[in-house]
């Protein structure tokens, strides 16, 4: 073992020894940064949970954490790091897709041996790395995008850049924090009843005043190109002036009123379809090569198998 490596390992172990007694042992040291056995165990549980129980175990978790240490350290050299607010927003978005509040989602994954911090650490690393890759290869990506769009446009008629512009209003049946299942079901019944007699967007605010704890947000305009497939599919089935079915959100049961719907031409569709064929794959390859370069220069010492 080289003198530099022995120094890294010694410092990492000293740091672990200075931590509270209940702290786990250092399993890996990456360029002087320790990875604890407890981190590996929790990450393995997260991988298993995300893969429906088919994870790569301790080895996969260890490798993933080593990669993350390298990615985050490299991004910090350039002064880049995803903020806690960005990470919390991403965490809340995942929770919402499972129709749970962040607190409920935290409890649900905790029952499977995964802490909220474990998932947030992974999100932070992924977001930080994406920021670095975009900045590092921005010029190349811009050039590829320009070429790809021009090529797609020249094919004439092979790409449909039509989209739908929606004017939408969100209607929320507010739920208290920690609402019970009975409370949620009661509010869902109330929401569905209101949905059946919704008078339309113009009268939405006045209508809400006759209901208990209902909020109506200001109208917003969105292109179908900026919406996910699931939401697009739902909105396309809703009649003008009507509401989508209630879905559990962070504030309560949320419905969306479709106030206006019209066809537009959206260049974002053209850009995205063109880049799907070229830029995305190339950028992914660039990121892989970049990580391999970092790994080839890294000093990694595995002290235990996790």
Image (cartoon, rainbow, N blue to C red):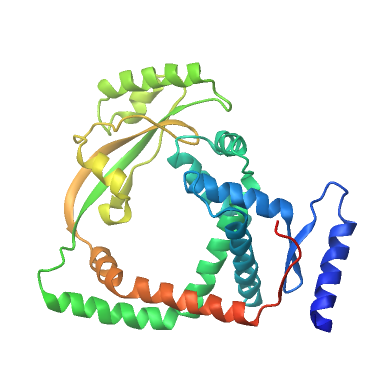
In the picture, which quadrant includes the C terminus?
bottom right
Residue located farthest toward the left when viewing the structure as drawn: 157
Q: Residue at x 40, y 83 (%)?
A: 140
Q: Residue at x 46, y 80 (%)?
A: 137
Counting from the top left corner in percent of width and height, residue 130 is at: 50, 67
Counting from the top left corner in percent of width and height, residue 8 is at: 81, 74
Counting from the top left corner in percent of width and height, residue 109 is at: 57, 39
- Number of numbered markers: 0
Query: Is any part of residue 82 visible from this angle?
Result: no
Seen in the picture, residue 127 relative to 88 is either above or below; the reply is below
In the image, taking residue 92 as reference, residue 146 lies left or right, namely left
Query: Is any part of residue 171 visible from this angle?
Result: yes
Q: Quadrant of residue 66?
A: bottom right
Q: Quadrant of residue 123?
A: bottom right
In the image, taking residue 22 as reference, residue 187 lies left or right, namely left
Question: Which residue is at the front of the view, 258 or 98?
Answer: 98
Counting from the top left corner in percent of width and height, residue 301 is at: 73, 71
Q: Residue at x 60, y 78 (%)?
A: 294
Seen in the picture, residue 265 relative to 206 is either above or below; the reply is below
In the picture, which quadrant includes the N terminus?
bottom right
Question: Which residue is at the front of the view, 289 or 1?
Answer: 1
Q: Quadrant of residue 275?
A: bottom left
Seen in the picture, residue 173 relative to 265 is either above or below; the reply is above
Q: Residue at x 50, y 41 (%)?
A: 95
In the image, taking residue 267 as reference, residue 49 lies left or right, namely right
Seen in the picture, residue 53 relative to 18 is either above or below; the reply is above
């Amino acid at each position: 073992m080289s003198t530099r490596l022995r120094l890294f390992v010694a410092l990492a172990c000293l740091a672990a020894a200075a931590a509270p007694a209940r702290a786990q042992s250092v399993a890996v040291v990456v360029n002087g940064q320790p990875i604890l056995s407890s981190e590996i165990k929790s990450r393995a549980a997260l991988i298993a949970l995300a893969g429906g129980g088919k994870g790569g175990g301790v080895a996969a978790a260890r490798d993933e954490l080593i990669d993350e240490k390298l990615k985050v350290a490299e991004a910090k050299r350039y002064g880049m790091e995803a903020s806690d607010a960005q990470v919390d927003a991403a965490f809340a978005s995942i929770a919402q897709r499972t129709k749970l509040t962040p607190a409920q989602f935290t409890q649900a994954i905790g029952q499977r041996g995964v802490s909220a911090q474990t998932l947030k650490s992974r999100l932070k690393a992924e977001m930080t790395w994406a920021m670095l890759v975009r900045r590092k290869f921005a010029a190349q990506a811009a050039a590829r995008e320009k070429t790809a769009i021009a090529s797609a446009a020249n094919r004439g008629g092979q790409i449909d850049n039509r989209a739908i512009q929606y004017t939408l209003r969100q209607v929320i049946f507010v739920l208290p924090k920690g609402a019970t299942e009975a409370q949620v079901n009661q509010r869902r019944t109330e929401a569905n009843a209101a949905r059946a007699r919704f008078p339309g967007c113009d009268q939405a605010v006045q209508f809400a005043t006759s209901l208990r704890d209902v909020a109506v947000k200001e109208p917003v305009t969105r292109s179908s190109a900026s919406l996910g497939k699931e939401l697009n599919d739902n909105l396309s089935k809703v009649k003008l002036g009507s509401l989508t079915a209630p879905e559990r959100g962070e504030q309560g049961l949320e419905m969306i009123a479709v106030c206006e719907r019209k066809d537009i031409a959206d260049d974002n569709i053209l850009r995205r379809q063109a880049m799907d064929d070229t830029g995305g794959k190339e950028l992914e390859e660039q990121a892989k090569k970049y990580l391999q370069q970092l790994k080839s220069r890294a000093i990694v010492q595995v002290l235990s198998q996790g």
